[in-house]
Amino acid sequence: MSRNLRTVLIFGGFIGVVGAAFYPIYFRPLMLPEEYKKEQAINRAGIIQEDVQPPGLKVWSDPFGRK
């Protein structure tokens, strides 16, 4: 195996692993926003924002809301 091919395979493998790890973190929520909205509604049920939010900071907003 030539040196250049081995280098390309190593870097390509690294990029593939990073991409595979990045997919569920970034791309999946963008493709399935309804699923994540439901999950966040369940996770935040019973939480009163004013009780947990430090004074002077912005209150939670919908992370999937578009401007």
Image (cartoon, grey):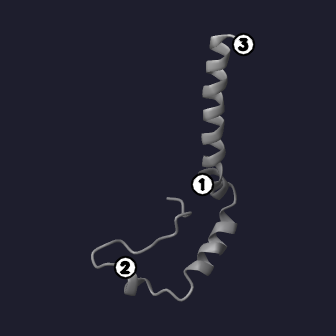
Q: How dense is the environment of label 3, judged by Cα within 10 Å: few (below 14), some, or many (20 and up)?
A: few
Label 1 belongs to which residue?
Answer: 25
Most extreme residue toward the right, as rendered? 1
CA separation, marks 2 and 3?
58 Å
- The amino acid pointed to by label 1 is Ile
Q: Residue at x 62, y 80 (%)?
A: 42
User: Element at badge 3?
Assistant: loop
CA separation, marks 1 and 3?
35 Å
Where residue 36 sits in the image (x, y, percent)? Answer: 64, 67
User: Element at badge 2?
Assistant: loop
Q: How dense is the environment of label 1, judged by Cα within 10 Å: few (below 14), some, or many (20 and up)?
A: few
Of tags 1 and 3, the one toward the viewer is: 3
Label 3 belongs to which residue?
Answer: 1
Tag 2 and tag 3, C-beta contact below 8 Å:
no
- The amino acid pointed to by label 3 is Met
Most extreme residue toward the top, as rendered? 2
| Residue 59 falls in image quadrant | bottom left
Query: Could you tell whether 39 is left or right of 60 in the image?
Result: right
Tag 1 and tag 3, C-beta contact below 8 Å:
no
In front of the other: 3 or 28: 3
Labelled disc at residue 53 = 2
